Image (cartoon, rainbow, N blue to C red):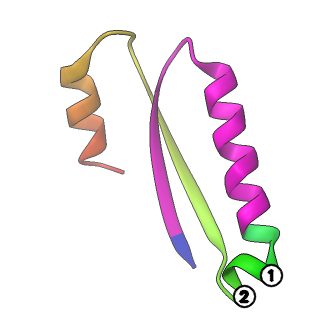
Amino acid sequence: MKGIGAIFEENALRDEEVFQLAVSDLSLSDDVLQSEKITHSIKLIEPNNPFQAVQEGGSI
């Protein structure tokens, strides 16, 4: 099992949904990953706060 992470601003709910759907589609596709499955982790940050993005990026 492989993990992938993403950081989104709190007001980017549509981006978060698209990311989750893309990870789910990849995980379910035997053609792309064969026997591997992908899990995801999402962190939400305050808009326009690059320092928080750096901090959260270290914990994904």
**SS of the residue under disc 1:** helix
**Vertical comparison of 49 with 57: above or below:** above
**Vertical comparison of 41 with 56: above or below:** below
> Looking at numbered disc 1 in the image, what kind of residue is underneath it?
Asp
* In the image, farthest residue toward the front: 31
The answer to whether residue 10 is magenta is: yes
**Disc 1 designates what residue?**
30
The answer to whether residue 56 is magenta is: no
In screen coordinates, is 30 left or right of 33? right
Residue at 49%, 59% in the rendered image: 4
Pick the quarter of the image with the N terminus. Answer: bottom right
For the record, the magenta segment spans 3-26
Circle 2 crowding by C-alpha within 10 Å: few under 14, some 14–19, many from 20: few
In screen coordinates, is 1 left or right of 47? right
Residue at 27%, 14% in the rendered image: 49
Residue 53: percent from the left, percent from the top?
28, 29
Circle 1 crowding by C-alpha within 10 Å: few under 14, some 14–19, many from 20: few
Residue 52: percent from the left, percent from the top?
25, 24
Residue 54: image tag: none
**Disc 2 designates what residue?**
34
> Looking at numbered disc 2 in the image, what kind of residue is underneath it?
Gln
Residue 6: percent from the left, percent from the top?
47, 43
**SS of the residue under disc 2:** loop
Residue at 72%, 87% in the rendered image: 34
**Vertical comparison of 23 with 14: above or below:** below
- Contact flag, marks 2 and 1 (Cβ < 8 Å): yes
**Residue 37 lies in quadrant:** bottom right
Count of all numbered marks drawn on residues in the image: 2
